[in-house]
Amino acid sequence: MRRNVSTTVRVKLNSLTNRKAYLLGREYEAFQREVHGGDADLYSATKQQASKVRRQKDPNEDTEQPVVLRNDVLDVTHDEDTVLSSWWVKVPVYDPEQGQGNSIWCPAHVPRKDEQLVREGDIRDSELVRRDGDWYVHLVIKRSVTVQDEYEDVLAIDMGARWVATCAFLSDRKTTFYGEEVRRIREHYKQLRKSIGKAKPRQGQQVVERIGGAEARKVDDRLHKIARQIVEDAEERNAVIVVGDLGGIRKDNDKGRYVNDKTHKMPFARLLNYLEYKAHDAGIDVQLVEEYDTSKTCNRCACEGVRETQGRFECPECGLDDNADKNGALNIGKRALGKFSKPLSEAGAVLAQPETQVIVHRDDEPANLRLTVDSTPSGGTPRL
């Protein structure tokens, strides 16, 4: 089955002149004013994108939004003969000296593994991002891939504050938790930044920027390893991958300072990007599933449960007592199968996409739940 998919490539802009850095910073700040209801001088195409972000997202005042760069005014070129860099990105900006829109060519670093994709792919609307004092352009590249259309299992993934990814197979509920090392790295550098800021308030900022780069590289390396392992597990069982859609998780979702801090800093989008890229290269499909209510619904009987602690889920109806993230992952998997309203007791089910068929065979069920295993409703595999 052929599918058109989008992959995000993270390109770092480097060796910027003071003028180029100023124009990027000015465009970024002007975009923030525009998306929060103000009026600012922006490159005309970018101003249109800011209005679209304001209408569609209605972002909170205290949030920063990446600058959306329209693909018809963005350009990426490769030239081995230039000394400063072999990759260059043309970024549209408003030039206050000229009083109109202009464009600047910025030297860039494209990860070696992504060079062919950037050369051959179709670049769509991308984003200008500022992180720890550095500038990045997240290139959204459209490409065509071949993925399987039949699977024997479902690997469901719940992303959360405690674990960056909780992965559960529907066939036997085997669950793997990922993210402990990511949290450890984050916490280590968080404490390091605090200690440096207190000890050297004047020189500390430069040191903080350097260790921010080290933190990003270590987290990035771990995310690649997590994505690779998840895809290998899915390949081994011929499983389609379904992921809870976290769109809007940071909006109107106040769960206290501690949980908010963990949630807002977990690199969900980056992990999903790596996961999709590696899965598609392996011929495995990745589907996003609406996550709403999956964390507080019992995966066994579909009743509303109780979470006395962040990591524990209890159901007052059927007595299920299990890890909360595992429960959420199983609900995500069942929702993808169109079986969220009742426990999965049938041998066959289909992912909610006509051309993709998933046949799931149940190996076991909890002893206190009566289910008919290996039976198919209505004498055949249902098609949605």
Image (cartoon, rainbow, N blue to C red):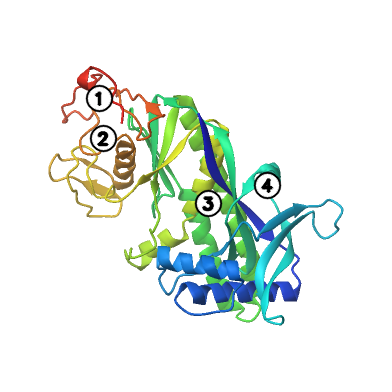
Residue at horizontal 33 percent and vertical 27 percent from the top: 171
Mark 3: which secondary structure?
helix
Dot 2: element: loop
Residue at 81% x, 52% y: name it. 79
Q: Which residue lies under the disc numbered 2? A: 339
Secondary structure beneath disc 1? loop
Mark 1 or 4, which is nearer the eye? 4
The kind of residue tagged 1 is Glu
Name the residue beneath numbered marker 1.
346
CA–CA distance in space, label 3 to label 1: 35 Å
Identify residue for label 3: 270
Q: Secondary structure at mark 4?
A: helix
In which image quadrant can residue 178 be found?
Answer: top left
345 above or below 180? above
Left or right: residue 371 versus residue 295 is left
The image position of residue 18, as x and y in percent, is: 74, 75
Badge 4 is on which residue? 118
Within 10 Å of disc 2 (Cα), the crowding (few <14, some 14-19, many 20+) is: some
User: In screen coordinates, is 296 left or right of 113?
Assistant: left
Asked whether residue 297 is in view, the answer is yes
Q: Quick check: marks 1 and 2 in contact, CB under 8 Å?
A: yes
**Relative to residue 87, is residue 350 drawn left or right?**
left
